Amino acid sequence: MHEAVITADIHPDPAEIARHRWMTETELRNAVQHWPFVPDGLDAYARYLAAPC
C-alpha cells in the first residue's frame, strides 16, 4: 500500500506485482479485512490511519 501523487502512466512489472489497482479509502478498509496482506503492508496501513490529517 502506498499513497502518492502520480502524473504519468504506471506500468508495474507483472513479475514483481501480483495485483494493482486504485482504491477508495472504503475499498481499502474492506480489502484489509478480507484479503491477505504482507505484514509490511498492514504496518504501513496502520501508520497511515494513525497519521494526523
Image (cartoon, helix red, strand yellow):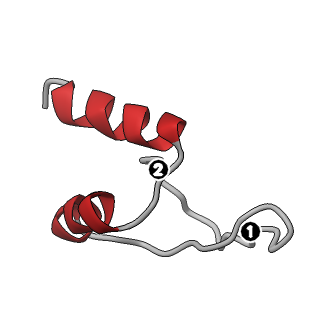
Residue at the image point whose x is 21% and y is 67% from the top? 30
Label 1 vs label 2: CA separation?
A: 14 Å
Question: Which quadrant would the C terminus be assigned to in this image?
Answer: top left
Pointer 2 local density, CA inside 10 Å: few below 14, some 14–19, many at least 20: some
Is 49 situated above or below 30?
A: above
Give the residue at mark 1. 12
Residue at the image point whose x is 18% and y is 26% from the top? 50
Q: Nearer the viewer, mark 1 or mark 2?
A: 2
Could you say which is closer to the camera, residue 51 or residue 36? 36
Callout 1 secondary element? loop
Q: Position of residue 23 (x, y in %)?
A: 33, 71
Choose the circle earlier in sequence order: 1 or 2: 2
Give the residue at mark 2. 1
Indicate the quadrant where residue 52 lies: top left
Q: Position of residue 45 (x, y in %)?
A: 33, 40
Pointer 1 local density, CA inside 10 Å: few below 14, some 14–19, many at least 20: few
Asked if the residue at tag 2 contacts the one at tag 1, i.e. Cβ–Cβ closer than 8 Å, the answer is no
Amino acid type, residue under disc 2 in the picture: Met
Is 14 situated above or below 17?
A: below
Could you say which is closer to the camera, residue 32 or residue 45? 32
